[in-house]
C-alpha cells in the first residue's frame, strides 16, 4: 500500500524548491501544464531528472506555491508581495486562465494593468529610438547615407519640439514656446480693454465696430508666425502622421492658427460675403484662448489633471446625477414650503417669496447644494429655512462622496508621471536564450542552439575588407558633411517658408493700413 502511494506521488523542483504532491491532484485541472506531468510519457516531454526522480522547471518558486495550492483547494489567490505582470506571466506559463483568480484578490491583481495603462499615457513623445545600425555594405552607399541621416536626425528634431526634457536645446525651445503662448493669451485679453480699442461709427444708422490697436495685431502676428513654424516642424518630423492628426492638442494648434490667416487674407476684400466671413472670424477669436492647453506639453501637472478628469468620468457622471436629483427634489420642496403660512390673497406669492415657480427654484437649489450661496434668492418662512438647511447638508454630502475617488486617481497619475520621468531608458543588452524544456516554443525549428536568437547561432557573414575601408573613409568626411548640410538646408527651407508667410502678412497689413 505504501509502495503504491509512492508511485502516485510527483516531485516537482521549481527554481530549486522541491514540491511534492499526488498525481490525482494534478489531474484536477486537465489541459494545464502540471496536468501533463501525470500523463504517461511525461518524463520524455519535460525536463525529468531520473537520479532524483523529479521534474525541474526554472520558474518563480514563490508563485508556484500559489499555483499548486490552486490544484489542491480549487481557489486561486494572488500573492500580495509579487508584481502583477510577473504573476500574470506565471499563470500563462502554467496554462491557467486569469479569470480563475478569486474575487478577493482580483482588484490587487488588476492594479498592474491600470498602472501600465497610466504609464503608456505618459510615454515619451519622442517615440521609439532609432534602430540599431545595420552592418555597412559596399553597394548603395549613397542611399545608405541618406537613410542614416533621416533615421538619425528625425527622432532628435522631433524630440526637440515635443519633449522639453530630451536636451538643453529642447528646453530653450520649450521656453520660447511658453513665452509666445503667454504673450498670445495676454494679447487676447488686452484686446478687450477700453484703452487699446477704438470705436468706429459709420453710416446714417450708428453701428459701432470695435477695432484693436495695430500694435497688438503685430504682436499677435509674430506669435502666429512662431506657432506656424513650430507646427510645421512637428508635422514634418513626427514618427506617425496618423497619430499626429488624431491628437487633440495638434487639432487645437491648427484651429487656433487658421482664423488669423483667414482674417488677414480677407481683410482687404470689400464684398459683402467677405465682410460676413470677417464678422464670423471676429466672433470665433475666442478659439485663441485654447492655446492655453499647449501648456500641457511643458507641465506634467496639467497632463496629470487631464488624465485624472478622463479617468474620473464615471465619478463626475455620478456626481451630476446626484446633483440633478437633489435639485429637482429641493426645488419642489422650497416652492411648496414657501406657500405654508402665506397670504391667501397673494396667489402668485410675489409679495412674500422669491420662489414663484419650481424652475426658479432650480437655480437656488444648485447654488445652495454647491455651497456658493449668492444671496439673490433666499427663503423667508420658517418652513423654507428648514428646507434650505436640508438642501445645504445634502449638497455637502453629495459632493463629498466622489471626491476621494478623484483625489486617488490624481495621486496615482501624478506618482506614475514622476516615476516615468525618473525611469532610465532601457537598453537591449540581454542575450536571448533558447526555450526551456517544457515551454511552448521548445522543440520548434527556431529554438535550437543554432537559432538566430541563440548566442551560438548569431554568426555574422564575413564582411568585405574593401567595403569596410571605403565606409570608414566616407563616414568621417562626406557622411558628416552631408548630414550637417542636410540639416542646415532643412532649417533654411523652413525659415524661408516662414519668412515668406511673414512677408505676405506684412504686405497685407501695409495695404490695409494705407
Image (spheres, helix red, strand yellow):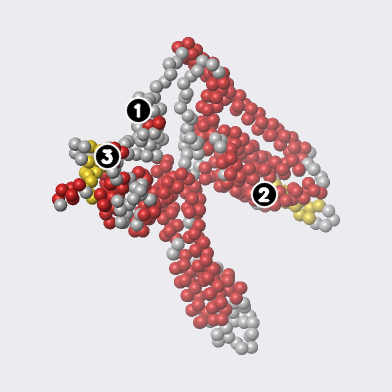
Q: Is residue 384 above or below residue 23?
A: below
In this orientation, does residue 54 appear? Answer: yes
Pinpoint residue 138: horizontal percent, then vertical percent: 51, 15
Pointer 2: what residue? 285
Pinpoint residue 342: horizontal percent, then vertical percent: 58, 86
Marks 3 and 2 in Cβ contact (< 8 Å): no
Q: Residues within 10 Å of mark 3 (few under 14, many from 20)?
A: some
Tell me how far mark 1 sits from mark 3, CA to CA: 22 Å
In this orientation, does residue 354 appear? Answer: no
Task: Please report whichever mark, 3 or 2, sits nearer to the chain's N-terminal start.
Answer: 3
Pinpoint residue 476: horizontal percent, then vertical percent: 49, 16
Task: Please identify the quarter of the rendering in which residue 219 is found.
Answer: top right
Task: Please identify the quarter of the rendering in which residue 244 is found.
Answer: top right
- Tag nearer the camera, 1 or 3: 3
- Tag nearer the camera, 3 or 2: 3
Q: Name the one closer to the observer, 498 or 223.
A: 498
Quadrant (top left/top right/bottom left/bottom right) for the C terminus: top right
Residue 53 appears left or right of 184: left
Q: Is residue 160 above or below residue 403?
A: above
Residue occupying the point 47% across, 49% down: 304
Residue 43's disc is: 3
Task: Please report whichever mark, 1 or 2, sits nearer to the chain's N-terminal start.
Answer: 2
Pinpoint residue 124: horizontal percent, then vertical percent: 47, 39
Residue 88 appears left or right of 344: left
- Tag nearer the camera, 1 or 2: 1
Amino acid at each position: 500500500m505504501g509502495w503504491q502511494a509512492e508511485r502516485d506521488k510527483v516531485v516537482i523542483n521549481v527554481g530549486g524548491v522541491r514540491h511534492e504532491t499526488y498525481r490525482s491532484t494534478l489531474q484536477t485541472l486537465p489541459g494545464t501544464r502540471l496536468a501533463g506531468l501525470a500523463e504517461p510519457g511525461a518524463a520524455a516531454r519535460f525536463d525529468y531528472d531520473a537520479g532524483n526522480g523529479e521534474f525541474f522547471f526554472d520558474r518563480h518558486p514563490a508563485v508556484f506555491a500559489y499555483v499548486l495550492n490552486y490544484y489542491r483547494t480549487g481557489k486561486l489567490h494572488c500573492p500580495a508581495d509579487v508584481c502583477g505582470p510577473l504573476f500574470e506571466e506565471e499563470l500563462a506559463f502554467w496554462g491557467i486562465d486569469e479569470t480563475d483568480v478569486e474575487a478577493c484578490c482580483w482588484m490587487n491583481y488588476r492594479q498592474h494593468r491600470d498602472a501600465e495603462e497610466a504609464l503608456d499615457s505618459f510615454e515619451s513623445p519622442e517615440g521609439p529610438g532609432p534602430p540599431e545600425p545595420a552592418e555597412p555594405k559596399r553597394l548603395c552607399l549613397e542611399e545608405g547615407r541618406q537613410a542614416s541621416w533621416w533615421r538619425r536626425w528625425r527622432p532628435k528634431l522631433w524630440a526637440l519640439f515635443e519633449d522639453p526634457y530630451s536636451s538643453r536645446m529642447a528646453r530653450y525651445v520649450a521656453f520660447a514656446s511658453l513665452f509666445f503662448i503667454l504673450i498670445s493669451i495676454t494679447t487676447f485679453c488686452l484686446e478687450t480693454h477700453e484703452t487699446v480699442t477704438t470705436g468706429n461709427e459709420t453710416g446714417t444708422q450708428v453701428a459701432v465696430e470695435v477695432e484693436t490697436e495695430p500694435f497688438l495685431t503685430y504682436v499677435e502676428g509674430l506669435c502666429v508666425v512662431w506657432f506656424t513654424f513650430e507646427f510645421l516642424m512637428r508635422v514634418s518630423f513626427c514618427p506617425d502622421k496618423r497619430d499626429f492628426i488624431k491628437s487633440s492638442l495638434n487639432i487645437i494648434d491648427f484651429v487656433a492658427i487658421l482664423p488669423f490667416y483667414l482674417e488677414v487674407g480677407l481683410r482687404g476684400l470689400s464684398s459683402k460675403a467677405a465682410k460676413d466671413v470677417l464678422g464670423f472670424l471676429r466672433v470665433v477669436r475666442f478659439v485663441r484662448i485654447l492655446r492655453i492647453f499647449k501648456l500641457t506639453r511643458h507641465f506634467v501637472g496639467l497632463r496629470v489633471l487631464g488624465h485624472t478628469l478622463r479617468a474620473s468620468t464615471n465619478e463626475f457622471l455620478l456626481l451630476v446625477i446626484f446633483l440633478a436629483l437633489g435639485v429637482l427634489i429641493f426645488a419642489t420642496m422650497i416652492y411648496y414650503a414657501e406657500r405654508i403660512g402665506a397670504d391667501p390673497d397673494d396667489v402668485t406669492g410675489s409679495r412674500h417669496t422669491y420662489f414663484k415657480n419650481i424652475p426658479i427654484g432650480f437655480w437656488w437649489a444648485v447654488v445652495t447644494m454647491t455651497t456658493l450661496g449668492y444671496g439673490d434668492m433666499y427663503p423667508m418662512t420658517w418652513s423654507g429655512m428648514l428646507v434650505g438647511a436640508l438642501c445645504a447638508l445634502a449638497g455637502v454630502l453629495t459632493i463629498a462622496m466622489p471626491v476621494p475617488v478623484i483625489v486617488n486617481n490624481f495621486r496615482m497619475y501624478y506618482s506614475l508621471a514622476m516615476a516615468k520621468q525618473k525611469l532610465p531608458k532601457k537598453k537591449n543588452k540581454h542575450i536571448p536564450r533558447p526555450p526551456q524544456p517544457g515551454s511552448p516554443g521548445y522543440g520548434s525549428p527556431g529554438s535550437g542552439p543554432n537559432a538566430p536568437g541563440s548566442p551560438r547561432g548569431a554568426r555574422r557573414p564575413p564582411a568585405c575588407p574593401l567595403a569596410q575601408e571605403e565606409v570608414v573613409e566616407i563616414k568621417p568626411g562626406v557622411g558628416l558633411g552631408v548630414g550637417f548640410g542636410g540639416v542646415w538646408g532643412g532649417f533654411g527651407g523652413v525659415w524661408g517658408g516662414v519668412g515668406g508667410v511673414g512677408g505676405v502678412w506684412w504686405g497685407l497689413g501695409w495695404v490695409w493700413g494705407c
